[in-house]
Amino acid sequence: MNRLAHQEGMTLISWLVIVIGIGVAALVAIRLVPIYIESYTVGSILQTMEGDPGLRKSTRQEVRQTFGKRLDMNNIEHGIRNNLKINKVLGGLQLIVDYQARVHLLGNLDAVASFRKEAMIRN
């Protein structure tokens, strides 16, 4: 009696699909991780400014300049400086950074990530 031989393992096409999937996932990660690190840095800058006693009696212009200097020190350039909103509220100044970062992925595909960070500088 002849037994039919059964192929075991993956075919070349299966391997290609897996490798292409891993490659696309790696590409997306390589492109998106830097903007999330940048967002974390912006949040860290705001938290530092929130706890800075030197900013307690500062004007909006001084706060804006301090924020800009800290962005420059951390080499952040995505136009975040222009997205700082400073609201005078009871007890101090509320800082809001609301921005979007766009990153080119592949071909005509882009990824857009939206971020909103807040801090409060108390009087």
Image (cartoon, rainbow, N blue to C red):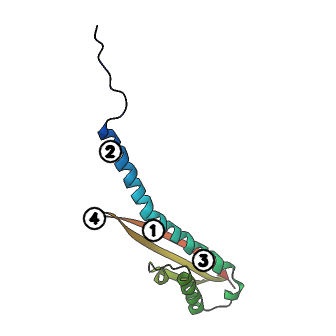
User: What residue does disc 1 label?
Assistant: 114
Going by the image, does 52 lie left or right of 2?
A: right
Q: CA distance from mark 1 to mark 2?
A: 34 Å
Going by the image, does 72 lie left or right of 58?
A: left
Front tag of 3 and 2: 2
Going by the image, does 50 lie left or right of 3?
A: right
Q: Amino acid at mark 2?
A: Leu
User: What residue does disc 3 label?
Assistant: 46
Mark 2 closeness class: few <14, some 14–19, many ≥20 residues within 10 Å: few
In the orientation shown, which residue stands out farthest toward the right?
53
Q: Amino acid at mark 4?
A: Asn
Q: Residue at x 70, y 88 (%)?
A: 54
User: What residue does disc 2 label?
Assistant: 16
Mark 4 closeness class: few <14, some 14–19, many ≥20 residues within 10 Å: few
* N-term-proximal mark, 4 vs 3: 3
Quarter of the C terminus within the rendering? bottom right
* N-term-proximal mark, 1 vs 2: 2
In the image, 5 versus 34, the foreground residue is 5
Indicate the secondary structure of the residue bearing disc 4: loop
Front tag of 1 and 4: 4
Q: Which mark is residue 80?
A: none
* N-term-proximal mark, 3 vs 1: 3
User: What residue does disc 4 label?
Assistant: 108
The image position of residue 79, as x and y in percent, is 44, 80
